[in-house]
Every structure is written in structure tokens, then in C-alpha cells.
Image: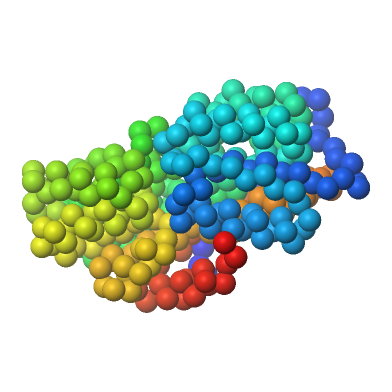
């Protein structure tokens, strides 16, 4: 599958007290805390990690709150796994700025951190590696695909996540850059909190004020599907693009409803996190940033991705 981005920077990770060391005969124990375990996207990340852990005899403690906006609960989960004498922490911070303290706790315990999907604020470098998508580039890819279905002067609705969530913000900013350059008008840019029902309500409200919306870019597929429902109820069929290529989104594409989605390599995020944790155990220097890839999915290749997902052990 084609990757839009390859951004890998080689760097050595070392704690203030030196590089982490592991007993050669000790089973690796990894604590993984994701933004949630309730959405399709994060279930696929988890599936990649569980498969790699089983294959490599890694003890995996996997946790995630019920929703992505349960920031305090997620941080508490990180503290819980740190108390269980883990060797490596794999973490997807919902609110990176709010997660600095808990990662400093990991450093104090000598536990190396592998970030997945979402990085930490600029200037914070106390982690071994970041594995994920260049979200700005993914947004640009989505914006380019949407622009190909529109003409100059068309009005676009942008839906992002919770304010302060850099992953969603970067995606929408990337799409906005491309759409504006192509001559589209950004009619509204609204938070939908990564939630289908909220996106549905937000889109309804936008349509009341601006009924002639010609296209939608959403920071994830839950929002895209919520916007789709609102558009359908308004009797409008416009191109809508999301991010994540969830099963529901893929089925919607095959039905001719949703136009497309940018698929991240989320299964590979989970798989690579475990594999890189093993490399740390072996004393190998790992790349500071690892791109897991992103691909445009439309009706033309949605079935292919669906078929692949069926082979994934949940």
C-alpha cells in the first residue's frame, strides 16, 4: 500500500541514569495504555499489539478508558501499569500536555516509553520512540482527495476533535491548507469530539446557517459518519472524507455513501510497538520516529482493506 509519508529520524534514547537494561532471561513485560479500547480504530491497534506479544512471548498489560475524552482516567491507568513493574510503557496520550508528569514518573522509574499515534508537546523528548502517522500529511492527503471532487468556490465543513487533541487538529489543519490552496471556502470549522452523534448535531446546526455545504472533511470516521447522516437527512449527497478507514466507514463507501477515508497503519502501530520494545530489551538503538504509513481508501479499494481486517485476530 502506498505511503504518503516517510519520516524516520535516527536518534539514540538514553535516560539521565543511562540506557535501559533488561535481564536476558526475563520475560518482557509491556504496559500499553491507549486512548480507548471501545472504538474500531483502537481495537485494531490493540490487535496488532496482542498478536506481536503472543508471537514473541511478551507479557502485555493492555488498558484504555471507555472514551477518548476520559483524560484523567487514562493517566491513572498509566500510573497503574507503572506500579506493576513493567519493562516498557507503550502510550497513546489523549492530551499530551496533561501527560507530561506521568511520563516523568516513568523516567524516574527507569521505564522507557514508546508513544503510538500521538506524540508529546514540542520540547519533550523523554521517550524512546514515536510510532504513528504524520497527521498533518494525512490531513493534506484527505484535503487533496476532497478537493478533487469539488471546484473553486465550493463550501467545505471541517470537523475536528476535542480542543487540545493535536492528532485531530493536525489532520484538519492539513486538509484546510490544501483546500484553501485549491480555492475552496471553509464555511465552518467545528469540534465534534471524535463522536458520531456530536458530529451529526454539529453538522445539522451548520446546515441551518449554511445549507449549501459542498463537502466535508472530518478528523476521523466517527465524525464523518455523523456528518453523513445529517447530510442524508437534509437530502444532500456531498463528498465526505474521514480518517481511520474503520469497518463502518468502509461499508459506507461500498454502499456509495461516504466518499473516502485516510487509512492509518494502526495495526502496524501496535505490532511495531511490541517489536521495538523487544529491540530495547536486546539493547538495540531504535529510531526516534517511525512512520506507520497512511493510504487513501475509496470505494475502489475498500473491499480489499475489509478483507484484510477479517484476517486480524481481535
* Quarter of the image with the C terminus in it: bottom right
**Does 242 appear above or below 164?**
below
**Residue 83 image offset from top left, x and y in percent:** 71, 29
Name the one closer to the observer, 142 or 179.
Answer: 142
Name the one closer to the observer, 290 or 72.
Answer: 72
Q: Quadrant of residue 114?
A: top right
Residue 196 appears left or right of 96: left
**Residue 119 image offset from top left, x and y in percent:** 54, 39
Q: Residue at x 65, y 24 (%)?
A: 104
Q: Residue at x 59, y 23 (%)?
A: 101
Q: Residue at x 74, y 61 (%)?
A: 55
**Does 191 appear above or below 310?**
above
Residue 41 appears left or right of 177: right
Q: Residue at x 27, y 44 (%)?
A: 198
Residue 219 appears left or right of 283: left
Q: Quadrant of residue 242?
A: bottom left
In this rendering, does residue 27 appear at all? yes
Residue 153 appears left or right of 75: left
Amino acid at each position: 500500500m502506498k505511503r504518503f509519508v516517510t519520516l524516520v529520524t535516527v536518534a539514540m534514547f538514553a535516560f539521565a541514569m543511562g540506557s535501559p537494561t533488561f535481564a536476558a532471561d526475563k520475560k518482557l513485560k509491556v504496559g500499553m495504555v491507549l486512548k480507548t479500547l471501545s472504538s474500531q480504530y483502537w481495537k485494531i491497534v490493540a490487535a496488532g499489539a496482542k498478536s506481536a506479544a503472543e508471537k514473541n512471548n511478551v507479557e502485555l498489560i493492555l488498558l484504555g478508558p471507555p472514551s477518548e475524552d476520559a483524560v484523567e482516567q487514562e493517566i491513572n491507568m498509566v500510573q497503574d501499569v507503572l506500579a506493576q513493574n513493567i519493562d516498557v510503557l507503550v502510550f497513546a496520550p489523549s492530551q499530551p500536555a496533561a501527560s507530561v508528569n506521568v511520563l516523568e514518573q516513568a523516567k524516574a522509574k527507569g521505564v522507557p516509553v514508546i508513544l503510538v499515534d500521538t506524540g508529546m508537546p514540542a520540547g519533550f523528548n523523554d521517550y524512546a520512540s514515536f510510532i504513528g502517522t504524520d497527521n498533518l500529511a494525512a490531513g493534506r492527503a484527505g484535503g487533496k482527495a476532497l478537493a478533487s471532487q469539488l471546484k473553486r468556490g465550493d463550501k467545505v465543513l471541517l470537523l475536528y476533535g476535542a480542543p487540545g487533541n493535536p492528532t485531530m487538529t493536525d489532520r484538519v489543519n492539513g486538509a484546510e491548507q490544501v483546500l484553501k490552496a485549491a480555492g475552496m471556502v471553509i464555511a465552518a470549522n467545528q469540534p465534534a469530539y471524535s463522536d458520531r452523534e456530536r458530529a451529526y448535531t454539529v453538522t445539522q446546526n451548520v446546515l441551518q446557517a449554511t445549507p449549501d455545504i459542498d463537502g466535508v472533511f472530518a478528523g476521523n470516521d466517527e465524525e464523518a459518519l455523523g456528518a453523513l447522516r445529517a447530510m442524508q437527512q437534509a437530502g444532500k449527497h456531498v463528498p465526505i472524507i474521514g480518517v481511520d478507514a474503520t469497518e463502518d466507514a468502509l461499508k459506507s463507501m461500498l454502499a456509495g455513501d461516504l466518499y473516502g477515508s485516510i487509512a492509518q497503519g494502526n495495526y502496524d502501530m501496535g505490532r511495531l510497538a511490541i517489536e521495538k520494545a523487544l529491540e530495547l530489551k536486546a539493547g538495540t538503538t531504535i529510531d526516534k520516529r517511525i512512520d506507520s504509513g497512511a493510504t487513501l481508501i475509496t470505494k475502489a479499494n475498500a473491499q480489499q482493506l475489509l478483507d484484510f481486517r477479517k484476517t486480524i485476530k481481535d
